[in-house]
Amino acid sequence: MSRPHLAESWESVWPASRWQRYLRAQLASGFSRPFIASLDGADRGYVEIYRAAKDSIAERYEYDPYDLGLHVAVADLDHMQQGHVSYLLPHLLGGMFNLDPRCRRVMFDPDYRNKIARRFCEAGGCVFLGEHDMSNRRMALYALPRTPDDVPRLRDVSELRRDPLSE
């Protein structure tokens, strides 16, 4: 995760001890699950599947409680350019939809500067829901809907910021 392309987009160049705490917390919660993606017996990537409705991105779109989110990190840029990630991820996404028939969409929220992730989302049929300033970063929000009717609408961010006590 300390490689330059991951450090920029994940903003988590942490020591191993912090990663261990982070992964333990994931495994102890019902929010997300970490996975290692392997090919031919070699670890090639890190994958997180999470409940998008419980994440901060849910403030930006009309979420369904069964929406899933996906974060992917591949350290070896050459490996990505060989097309292995483009081959693997459609199978992973299909599996996610098959395992949870209530899931209407898979959400992606890469850093807005992450051209590789954005190209993958766009080539994979995701719907672009805009760039959004979050408390800690600017993201590009994408949805991969199960059906065309599952494309979410954006939420009115001004409603989120309105102070009900001032009315």
Image: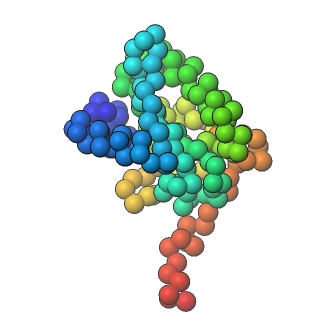
For residue 22, side relative to residue 130 (left or right):
left
Q: Is residue 46 above or below residue 26?
A: above
For residue 89, side relative to residue 44 (left or right):
right
Q: Quadrant of the N terminus?
A: top left
What residue appears at the point 45 percent right and 58 percent down from the top-left corner?
133
Question: Is residue 7 visible in the rendered structure shown here?
Answer: yes
Q: Position of residue 143 (x, y in %)?
A: 62, 44
What residue appears at the point 29 percent right and 39 percent down from the top-left corner?
19
Q: Position of residue 9 (x, y in %)?
A: 38, 40
For residue 5, side relative to residue 102 (left or right):
left
Q: Is residue 106 above or below residue 131?
A: above
Q: Is residue 135 above or below residue 2?
A: below
Q: How are the residues colored?
A: rainbow
Q: Quadrant of the C terminus?
A: bottom right
Q: Position of residue 117 (x, y in %)?
A: 49, 34
Observer-nearest residue: 163 or 92? 92
What residue appears at the point 29 percent right and 38 percent down from the top-left corner?
20
Quadrant housing residue 147: top right
Observer-nearest residue: 164 or 95? 95
Observer-nearest residue: 8 or 98? 98
Quadrant housing residue 97: top right
